[in-house]
Image (cartoon, grey):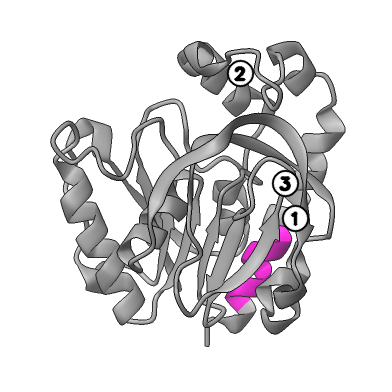
Amino acid sequence: MRRLHYLQHVPFENIGTIRSWAETAGMQINGTRLYNREHLPSIGEFDWLIIMGGPMSVSEEPLYPWLRKEKNLIRQAIEHRKVVLGICLGAQLIADVLGARVHPNAHREIGWFPVHKTGATRQSTVSDAIPNGLQVLHWHGETFDQPEGTIHLGRSEACNNQGFSLDDRIVGLQFHLEVTPRNLERMIRHCRNEMDGSHYVQTPEMMLSDRERFTSANRVMGNLMKCLKELDR
């Protein structure tokens, strides 16, 4: 039985449909709620590490002291060839650990916008799970430079670096495929102050209006997890 461990930074942003996929796949699921100051696992306690999003920045270690220990765990997971998937802040944390710069994006991007594959994606097996031009949910004001040695998976109109992979075991996605309508409602409630009406920021009504977007994104999330499972030999 493969063991999946997730790192959750805030109460309102959980692993969404990743949980149901992992349960169906027969995986053991455990997590660390960092906002509750729960202890991180040792490197031998998991096979997969899922790193979720959150409103904090990777550089805010004085405000969130657990960030330093979390980065150390991510580094160990990469060195021990675990499967590592980072979503939004999680992708930024992986990028930071790999030595890339994390910084404010030119635009705040909140809402459903398409992500387009790059010419490099054909080098990555995991990219096959994500269709070109897929409408995905974004919620970020920062971005990352492309980490050295990784494959650039996609870009959007507002943000050039939307994802990367390394050795088809390490994946960082700036966007959310796991989100459900209830997840998004909670994100809106807790992070409404970030919705400034700028060009790439949609209204809550726009974001919640089309349930098929959630269905499509969740299906792709499952395909990506299946692909990672097949590569996890």
The label shown at residue 218 is 3
Question: Looking at the image, is mark 3 or mark 2 earlier in the sequence?
Answer: 2
Compute the Cα span from label 2 to label 1: 21 Å
Q: Position of residue 21 (x, y in %)?
A: 62, 55
Badge 2 crowding class, 10 Å Cα cut-off, few under 14, some 14 to 19, many 20 or more, is some
Residue 187, above or below 79: above
Image point (38%, 27%), residue name: 11
Left or right of residue 32: residue 13: right
Image point (48%, 11%), residue name: 193
Left or right of residue 115: residue 55: left
Residue most extreme to the bottom: 233
| Range shown magenta | 222-229
Question: Looking at the image, is mark 2 or mark 1 earlier in the sequence?
Answer: 2
Compute the Cα span from label 3 to label 2: 16 Å
In the rendered structure, does residue 33 fall within the stretch colored magenta? no
Which amino acid type corresponds to the residue marked 1 in the rendered image?
Answer: Val
Q: Position of residue 106 (x, y in %)?
A: 56, 37
Badge 1 crowding class, 10 Å Cα cut-off, few under 14, some 14 to 19, many 20 or more, is some
The label shown at residue 7 is none
Which amino acid type corresponds to the residue marked 2 in the rendered image?
Answer: Glu
Q: Which residue is at the front of the view, 106 or 28?
A: 106
Secondary structure at numbered mark 2: helix
Secondary structure at numbered mark 3: helix
Q: Position of residue 131 (x, y in %)?
A: 82, 60
Report which residue position mark 2 lands on: 185
Q: Are marks 3 and 1 in contact (CB under 8 Å)?
A: yes
Secondary structure at numbered mark 1: helix
Magenta region, mostly helix, strand or loop?
helix
Left or right of residue 29: residue 169: right
Q: Which residue is at the front of the view, 131 or 36?
A: 131
**Quarter of the rendering containing residue 201:** top right
Report which residue position mark 1 lands on: 220
